[in-house]
Image: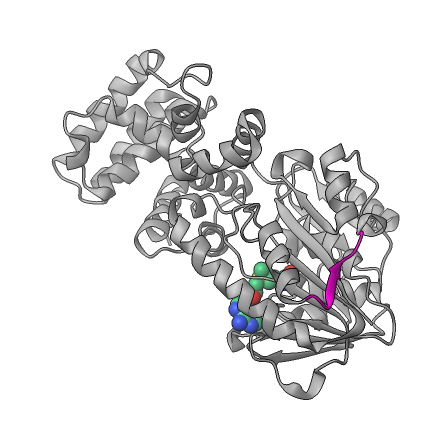
């Protein structure tokens, strides 16, 4: 069978992301799995797919300046132009001539006919005129700069500027365009971090301890995690470091009844099970039955037995657990605007209308799940977004509707980090948000609420 070219594989993934609204990270993993490509070529495919998506607005800006009728370029030709332009503008190690030639070859294979010469001409012009591109400068036009140069949608840029101010917004946008490190959580039921780090080092895998969690490990470079030592033996789980902060805030104890109301694929369910020494009773729910297998499979691999998995709509849970639950985690479905490093295409898909819809869903989930918590029990609400209506405002509104709950200082449950005064103030009030640029992690939010006895 003929070996596919890395650029061809990248183009197929980009086509699927745009035309079928596929998730880039899942589509990429799927395409690489069956590609037969070697490590370096696999790296190039990932770089091309994620890079083109991260820099989409900037690439279009550069290309549109060279096109006579930018609006008249068909989408398949534009995707090829972006692929070529990304290599020319952002990848020093690829010679310009190679970037142009390979893109033109792909255009021929795709049967683009006359458009092939347009692609050839525009890319060669880009090589010649790359220093003349009139990029909007941060100093003169901050909104345009972040929209074009950092490729974030204008509505989001304006929102963040209002919320976080100029410098923080710029830092968030910049970090969203950096590759995300792979991090692992060592399974405390089966291993300890030092021994695991040693095992990785012996296998030639560079890694450092995470500052955000005592069982966390950050890999120095991307790696096929299922091939790392200890995967099959259940020594670790792949999880972003910021997500590792949530289970310690829930703090489930042996013998307690715990509900993870929105649990798939089970990253936090398994973490809570590990922290309780596999001795809590954990009800792990998700509305989508097809996702439950992932939770079960993760528990099996990690040697966890205290989890009961069920398909449940947490807006309308059964009465059986009403007032019985010691700790309830609601890791809510959200806009995901804290994880744009890992899901670069999301920024072009989410709209303000989605925020309104998600806010309503989160409200229904909170109201549906809260009655399960027993008097004196704890409800932890978390998201991987940094939008106030999904986070701070959502929790404030919940507390107004449910005066039997109160926010609880969560600083004793947080890692020992160099927090800002604002972060310290918030965590003392029961809310904590990490912005993605602070510790180079996903952005996330967590709140700890206790039901009065
Ligand atoms: C942020 S993800 C959860 C991630 C998970 N806690 C983890 O750490 O691996 C949100 C989950 O909520 C689920 N979900 C959405 N609506 C739900 C509902 N009404 N009831 C229960 N689960 C729901 C989604 O299927 C999705 O798997």
Q: Is residue 282 left or right of residue 356?
A: right
> Looking at this view, is 84 or 210 the one in front?
210
Q: Quadrant of ligand 1?
A: bottom right
**Number of marks in the rendered image:** 0
Which span of residues is magenta-colored? 403-409
Q: Position of residue 147 (x, y in %)?
A: 40, 30
* Residue lying farthest to the left in this orientation: 114
> Looking at this view, is 329 or 60 the one in front?
329
Dividing the picture into quarters, in which one does residue 341 lie?
A: top right
Q: Residue at x 33, y 21 (%)?
A: 97
Q: Residue at x 48, y 55 (%)?
A: 26
Inspect this view and state whether residue 291 appears.
no
Reply above or below: 114 against 93. below
Q: Position of residue 193 (x, y in %)?
A: 84, 50
Q: Is residue 398 left or right of residue 124?
A: right
> Looking at this view, is 77 or 1 the one in front?
77
Q: Position of residue 106 (x, y in %)?
A: 28, 39
Dividing the picture into quarters, in which one does residue 137 lie?
A: top left
Q: Is residue 305 magenta?
A: no
> Which quarter of the rendering shows the C terminus?
bottom right
> Which quarter of the rendering shows the N terminus?
bottom left
Q: Residue at x 29, y 13 (%)?
A: 128
Reply above or below: 174 against 141. below
Inspect this view and state whether residue 214 appears.
yes
Reply above or below: 231 against 195. below
Q: Is residue 324 left or right of residue 120?
A: right
Q: Position of residue 74 (x, y in %)?
A: 19, 41
Q: Name the image colouring.
A: one colour
Q: Residue at x 66, y 67 (%)?
A: 402
* Residue lying farthest to the bottom in this orientation: 320
């Amino acid at each position: 069978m003929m070996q596919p070219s890395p650029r061809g594989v990248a183009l197929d993934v980009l086509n699927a992301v745009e035309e079928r609204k596929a998730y880039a990270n899942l589509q990429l993993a799927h395409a690489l799995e069956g590609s037969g490509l070697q490590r370096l070529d696999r790296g190039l495919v990932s770089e091309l797919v994620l890079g083109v998506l991260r820099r989409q607005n900037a690439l279009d800006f550069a290309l549109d300046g060279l096109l006579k009728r930018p609006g008249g370029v068909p989408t398949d030709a534009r995707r090829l132009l972006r692929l070529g332009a990304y290599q020319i503008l952002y990848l020093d190690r690829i010679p310009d001539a190679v970037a142009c030639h390979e893109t033109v070859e792909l255009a021929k294979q795709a049967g683009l006919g006359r458009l092939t010469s347009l692609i050839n001409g525009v890319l060669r012009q880009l090589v010649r005129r790359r220093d003349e591109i009139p990029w909007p400068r941060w100093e003169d036009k901050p909104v345009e700069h972040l929209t074009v140069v950092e490729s974030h949608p204008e509505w989001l840029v304006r929102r963040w500027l209002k919320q976080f101010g100029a410098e923080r917004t710029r830092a968030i946008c910049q970090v969203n365009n950096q590759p995300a490190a792979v991090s692992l959580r060592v399974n405390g039921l089966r291993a300890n971090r030092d021994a695991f780090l040693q095992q990785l080092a012996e296998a030639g895998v560079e890694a450092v301890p995470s500052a955000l969690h005592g069982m966390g490990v950050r890999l120095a470079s991307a790696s096929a995690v299922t091939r790392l030592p200890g995967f099959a033996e259940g020594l670790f789980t792949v999880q972003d470091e910021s997500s590792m902060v949530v289970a310690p805030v829930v703090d489930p104890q042996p013998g307690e009844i715990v509900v993870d109301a929105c649990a798939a694929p089970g990253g936090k369910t398994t973490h809570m099970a590990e922290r309780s020494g596999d001795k809590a009773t954990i009800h792990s729910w998700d509305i989508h039955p097809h996702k439950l297998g992932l939770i079960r499979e993760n528990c099996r691999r990690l040697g966890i037995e205290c989890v009961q998995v069920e398909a449940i709509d947490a807006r309308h849970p059964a009465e059986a657990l009403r007032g019985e639950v010691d700790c309830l985690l609601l890791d809510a479905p959200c806009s995901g605007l804290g994880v744009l490093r890992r899901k670069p295409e999301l920024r072009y898909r989410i709209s303000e209308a989605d925020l309104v819809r998600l806010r309503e869903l989160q409200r229904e989930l909170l109201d549906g799940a809260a009655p399960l918590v027993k008097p004196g029990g704890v409800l932890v609400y978390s998201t991987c977004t940094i939008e106030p209506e999904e986070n701070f405002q959502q929790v404030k509104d919940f507390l107004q509707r449910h005066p039997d709950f109160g926010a609880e200082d969560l600083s004793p449950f947080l890692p020992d980090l160099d927090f800002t005064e604002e972060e310290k103030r918030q965590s003392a009030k029961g809310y904590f948000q990490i912005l993605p640029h602070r510790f180079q992690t996903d952005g996330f939010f967590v709140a700890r609420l206790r039901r009065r006895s």
